[in-house]
């Protein structure tokens, strides 16, 4: 199937089976290896991308859904945007060790903060519950996201 | 490369047409369950019909004592909708499904279509005596949920039928709640219990209890319901009646808990769900 979509601000056209996971489109022909591959079953969240602005797990999204859509990875986060504030906050709070989960966490947090400006720590914890970090950095990750929410007040 | 055809109809008629003409066809709404089945090799369809662009299948409407939920309504839409105390259990059951990303994509129709015996939404729909509306090029039919859920991931839907919406009556005096226990937060239910109650002059008037993850599909518990209707509202009557739930369940060991554990957990969750539902009733105690 011919799939056309906007990826990080660029128009892309790829030939892909519509029932392949979107993650394989992004990591394969599109070479977006910032989209990580983990559990392959919707549990770990490392493959999270924004599909028309909403955080989704790209291993659970059929490639066919990308046709006509706008997809954003961490590479598509623009200078001066809220996404960049989230990235800077992760840096500041030392919210990463190995970094493998970081793109997924950043995009999940970004989509959530776009939706809910009144985020408190409990709500943030629930919003990122679908993302796993195996370096056990959760508290610093929550610190980072919470600091962005507070700075917006 | 798979030769699967991907359709994106914009109308109900268009979607029904694809289901009628394609041989081995699967409906996609959010894809959250389907993609796992594809990955595991359980599904290799000739055609996928993505109905997420069919606007007539989306949305929640509560008016004149009847509620309608479109098949492509997502868990997030359901959990963020102001449903009121009468339908609080729908929000509670939707909020504990998977995680935010999954709730963004996963739909009511997907839950009904896959009909996993541990899904959270199904016991709530059983409690509401929901009717499932199925459409095909032959027309539409409406099937009561308990008849629709045939067994383990088996439903009354024919392959050429599209799940279009569910419909149920809303009693303004009703209070509802969903109580779930799972091994990990937002994980699969070890046991999940939905309760809907109305009271009149200090007695239970109507009691409905639905359970998930304790049988080959979501079930009601007539034993608990019958034990409470007409009885005075008190902690003792609820506690005693809740024990009767074991008559209506037939759990298997699964990764979320042993059958023995589920049997001992179910009465406690029934008691809690009825208690929480009671606090939301609009009727006289």
Image (spheres, grey):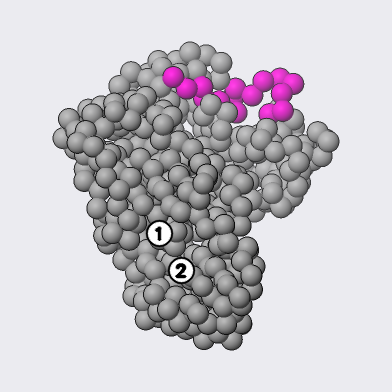
User: Which quarter of the picture shows residue B127?
Assistant: bottom left
Residue at x-position 74% and y-position 30%: A85
Which residues fall within the magenta stretch? A68-83
Quadrant where the C terminus of chain B lies? Answer: bottom right
Co-location on one chain, circles 2 and 1: yes
Residue at x-position 47% and y-position 22%: A69
- For residue B208, the mark is 2
Alpha carbon distance from label 2 to label 1: 9 Å
User: Which quarter of the picture shows residue B7?
Assistant: top left
Residue B226 is left or right of residue B139, and the answer is: right
Q: Is residue A33 above or below residue B192?
A: above
Find out whether residue B184 is within the magenta segment. no
Q: Position of residue B275 (x, y in %)?
A: 60, 72
Q: Regarding mark 2 in the picture, which secondary structure is present there?
A: strand
- For residue B229, the mark is none
Please state which of residues A110 and B145 is positioned toward the viewer in this rendering: B145
The numbered mark 1 sits on a residue in which chain?
A: B
Q: Tell me, yes or no, if residue A84 can be seen here.
A: yes
Q: Regarding mark 1 in the picture, which secondary structure is present there?
A: loop
Residue B224 is left or right of residue B152, and the answer is: right
Residue at x-position 40% and y-position 47%: B166
Q: Position of residue A26 (x, y in %)?
A: 45, 27
Asked whether disc 2 touches disc 1, contact meaning CB atoms under 8 Å apart, the reply is yes
The residue where tag 1 is placed is B129
Quadrant where the N terminus of chain B lies? Answer: top left
Q: Position of residue A104 (x, y in %)?
A: 58, 38
Please state which of residues A68 and B93 is positioned toward the viewer in this rendering: B93
Q: Is residue B71 above or below residue A67?
A: below
Q: Tell me, yes or no, if residue B19 can be seen here.
A: no
Q: Tag 2: Cα neighbours inside 10 Å, few (<14), some, or many (≥20)?
A: many
The numbered mark 2 sits on a residue in which chain?
A: B
């Amino acid at each position: 199937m011919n799939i056309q979509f906007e990826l990080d601000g660029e128009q892309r056209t790829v030939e892909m089976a519509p029932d392949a996971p979107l993650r394989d489109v992004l990591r394969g022909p599109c070479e977006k290896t910032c989209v990580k591959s983990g559990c392959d079953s919707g549990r770990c969240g490392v493959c999270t991308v924004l599909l028309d602005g909403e955080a989704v797990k790209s291993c659970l999204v059929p490639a066919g859904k990308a046709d006509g859509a706008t997809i954003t990875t961490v590479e598509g986060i623009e200078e001066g945007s809220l996404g960049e504030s989230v990235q800077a906050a992760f840096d500041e709070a030392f919210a990463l060790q190995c970094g493998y989960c970081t793109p997924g966490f950043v995009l999940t947090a970004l989509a959530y903060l776009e939706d809910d400006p009144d985020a408190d720590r409990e709500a943030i914890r629930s919003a990122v519950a679908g993302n796993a970090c195996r370096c056990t950095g959760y508290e610093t990750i929550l610190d980072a996201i919470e600091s962005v929410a507070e700075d917006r007040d | 490369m798979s030769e699967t055809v991907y359709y994106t109809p914009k109308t109900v008629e268009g979607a029904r047409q694809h289901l009628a003409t394609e041989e081995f066809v699967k409906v996609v709404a959010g894809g959250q369950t389907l993609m796992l089945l594809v990955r595991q090799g359980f599904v290799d369809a000739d055609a996928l019909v993505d109905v997420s662009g069919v606007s007539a299948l989306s949305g929640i409407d509560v008016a004149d004592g009847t509620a309608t939920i479109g098949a492509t309504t997502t868990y997030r839409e359901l959990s963020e909708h102001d449903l009121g105390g009468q339908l609080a259990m729908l929000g509670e059951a939707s909020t504990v499904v998977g995680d935010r990303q999954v709730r963004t994509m996963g739909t009511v129709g997907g839950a009904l279509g896959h009909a996993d015996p541990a899904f959270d939404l199904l016991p709530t729909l059983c409690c509401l005596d929901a009717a499932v509306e199925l459409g095909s090029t032959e027309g539409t039919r409406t099937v009561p949920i308990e008849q629709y859920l045939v067994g383990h991931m088996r439903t009354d839907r024919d392959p050429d039928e599209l799940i279009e919406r569910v419909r149920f009556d809303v009693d303004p005096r009703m209070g509802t709640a969903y109580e779930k226990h799972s091994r990990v937060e937002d994980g699969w239910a070890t046991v999940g219990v939905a309760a809907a109650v109305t009271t009149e002059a200090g007695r239970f008037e109507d009691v409905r209890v639905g359970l998930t993850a304790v049988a080959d599909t979501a079930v009601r518990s007539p034993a608990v319901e019958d034990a409470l209707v007409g009885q005075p509202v008190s902690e003792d009557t609820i506690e005693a009646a809740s024990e009767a739930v074991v008559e209506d369940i037939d759990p298997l060991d699964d990764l979320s808990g042993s059958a023995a554990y589920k049997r001992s957990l179910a009465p406690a969750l029934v008691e809690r769900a009825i208690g929480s539902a009671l606090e939301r009733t609009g009727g006289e105690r």
